Image (cartoon, rainbow, N blue to C red):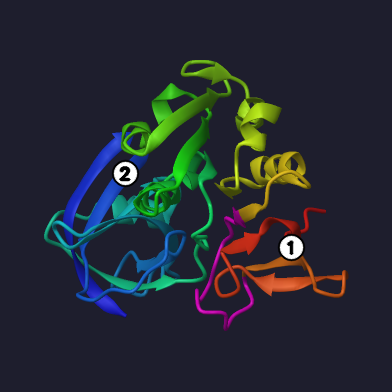
Amino acid sequence: MARLTILEHREIADNMRWLAFEAPHDLQYEPGQFLHIRVTDGVDHLLRRPISLCRVDGGRNALVVAYRVGGKGTKLLAAKNVGDTLDVLGPLGKGFPLHDEDRHAILVGGGIGVPPMVELADQLTQRGVQVTTIVGFQSKNVSILIDELTRYGEVLVATNDGSLGLQGFVTDYMTDELLASADRFYACGPTPMLRAVQARMTGRVEGYLSLEERMGCGIGACMACVTSCVLPDGSVGFKKVCKDGPVFPAPEVYFA
């Protein structure tokens, strides 16, 4: 736990913001982990907000997250200014595993599930892995981080209303040819998207799903973020998204 100073805080799309903190020295992290941020120092809004790690900027020793402004908690966070400090716990959870033998990976992000793909893409390309990223949004005005992701390879964009890229869904880009070329996939986004990606990839490409879930403690103590998973014996049980995840092997996630 630490109090981190805000280095940068700006809007990047409608109700979407970019927030950079001064990072602690010798930080240990994995792409796909999250920060648990307390938005006030008072008695209101005691529960922290889990926000995925978007980027680790070694050049200026900064941790970056991108988040959607929606409820009261994120509105309070959006009111913070450069120079303010926030109580931050993390990075927490299990991130995306990287595989040295891979040559081509498909990254899939939907909405607020796009930010963790930036750090993941950076680390994969540093290992010599070719990256194809597919991102989906409701519309152009809420699209984020496309330019950042383009630095690492091809980016395919889908929007529900067709205002940017293909009108449709991320799975519309998952052609037989693309899947045949991939060693691994990584996905983060809303549950309907993850369910569709899991169904499309099963038996074709191995990969991982990062789940979005409301959290309480963020460290596995409160049981507020349990999700259904397929256990080793084939039965369906429960795991904690904050501690056992948020990243899970795709076949392990059970969508009822």
Residue at the disc numbered 2: 17
Q: Is residue 211 magenta?
A: yes
Where is residue 137? Give x, y as percent: 51, 31
Q: Write the start and end of the magenta stretch as one range.
A: 209-224
Question: Which badge, 2 or 1, is on the more N-terminal residue?
Answer: 2
- Give the label on residue 123, or none: none
Residue at the disc numbered 1: 252
Indicate left or right for 214 with 34 as reference: right
Reply above or below: 152 against 240.
above
Magenta: main secondary structure equals loop
Quarter of the picture containing the N terminus is bottom left
Indicate left or right for 204 with 85 as reference: right
Q: Residue at x 49, y 36 (%)?
A: 132
Q: Residue at x 48, y 16 (%)?
A: 163
**Mark 2 falls on what kind of element?**
strand
Depth check, front residue: 220 or 96: 96
Name the amino acid, label 1.
Glu
Depth check, front residue: 176 or 21: 176
Where is residue 235? Give x, y as percent: 88, 70
Around disc 2, counting alpha carbons within 10 Å, would you say few (fewer than 14), some (14 to 19), or many (20 or more)? Answer: some
**Mark 1 falls on what kind of element?**
helix
